[in-house]
Image (cartoon, grey):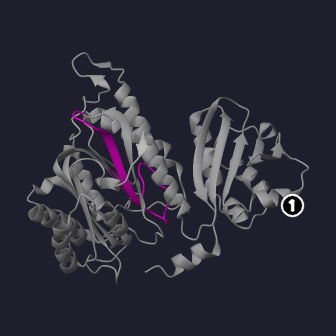
Amino acid sequence: MKEVEGGITAPQGFKAAGVHCGIKVTQPDLALIYSEVPAMSFGMFTSNKVKAAPVHYSLRKIRRHQTQAIIINSGNANACTGEKGLKDAEKMARLAAHHLGVKENMVLVASTGRIGKPLPMSEIEAGIEQAVESLSFKGGHRAARAILTTDKITKEIAVETDIPARGKGKVVIGGMAKGAGMISPNLATMLCFITTDACITEDALEEATRSAVNKSFNQISVDGDMSTNDSLFILANELSRNERIKTWHKKKKMRIEDENFDRFCQTLDFVCESLAKLIVRDGEGATKFIEVRVKGAPFPKDARRIARAVANSMLVKTAIAGASPNWGRVMSAVGAAHAKVKPHRVDVYFDNFLVVKGGLGVDAAEEKLGEVLKQDEVKITIDLHQGKDKATFWGCDLTEKYVKINKRYV
């Protein structure tokens, strides 16, 4: 596989647009993704009990597994807006469908921004018409800009798989995401949109997506807060006309060994992990990227719990922000993770620098460790010496700037 240009419009048959409709003062705030033909679709959503109106709407519509467009606004979450919010989400889909000339139930909706304010529907209505007129096979970057809130950078990628398409070329997967704060997803991520021209069965698409999300977006955190609007959508429009990717033989009800499924999964894993890491690197106020690796765990769930606990620890995050060689904060987070741990077996490394051996601090020059922690990327490795399972989690440091950004966020 190899990276290519184009983001979400790199796969065949996908157009996109990003426009300014007036939700924000000057920045683009309305994005549209469109497939020339109906696409097979799958979605994952926040497990937060307080779900935004577009999440409720798209949860219902995506059960059909057929989608042709997604309309997305930024600057307003349309969350905690009651019955009006639900009607506004429906109206966004209806307006997009009307201007595109497709069925309303083929349009999904997503929103991001401030919670609790009604959508300015007159501006959005004009914006949707403008977005439809602006659709382009080169519109991926503009769409990626239009979904941002406190993000400093756009997050987009496109990758050519090793799966041959009929005619010429190969199957392509493209994606874009947004997120910098309220990042501690469960089941999905902040907002993420993935497109592919692959010909693939519903069960194969779902299996590949769930697996990729669990290894990427469910393994990141900026501040430990889960959003009301987290949504991930993947659309597969089959225009590459490759041999259909399968995982199961429907009639024989047996597993199929499909090399192309493995190739598709590897590429989708790469796309999701790349976008997930971009989100963490762009964390609000962040100055350092943190990778927490746990190995030697007795069970996978223990490895994941410990990795998440260390990456989410406010004390660990602030220590790394200040380049403080306080390994005790890591040990405290390990013990608080509700996992099977034998403290007297635990080793801890900062990068390749051993700081804890068998649960006890190692006599080492703190000056040298301080230099390690001044790097832009810090790796924490925790070896439990209790088994063979492992997990990796990505996070960032916590600085005063995070507080400044969020105390004035309106």
Q: Is residue 207 left or right of residue 105?
A: right
Helix, strand or loop at mark 1: helix
Quadrant assignment for the N terminus: top left
Residue in the image at 53% along x and 80% along y: 407
Q: Which quadrant of the figure has residue 189?
A: bottom left
Task: Please name the amino acid that badge 1 sits on.
Answer: Glu
**Total count of labels:** 1
The answer to if 168 sits in the magenta stretch is yes
Q: Position of residue 295 (x, y in %)?
A: 67, 37
Q: Position of residue 171 (x, y in %)?
A: 31, 39
Q: Which residue is mark 1?
A: 367
Q: Nearer the viewer, residue 138 or 196?
A: 138
Q: Is residue 176 left or right of residue 371?
A: left
**Residue numbers of the magenta segment:** 166-194
- How busy is the neighbourhood of tag 1: few (under 14 within 10 Å), some, or many (20 plus)? few
Q: Is residue 346 above or below residue 399?
A: above
Q: Residue furthest front?
A: 168
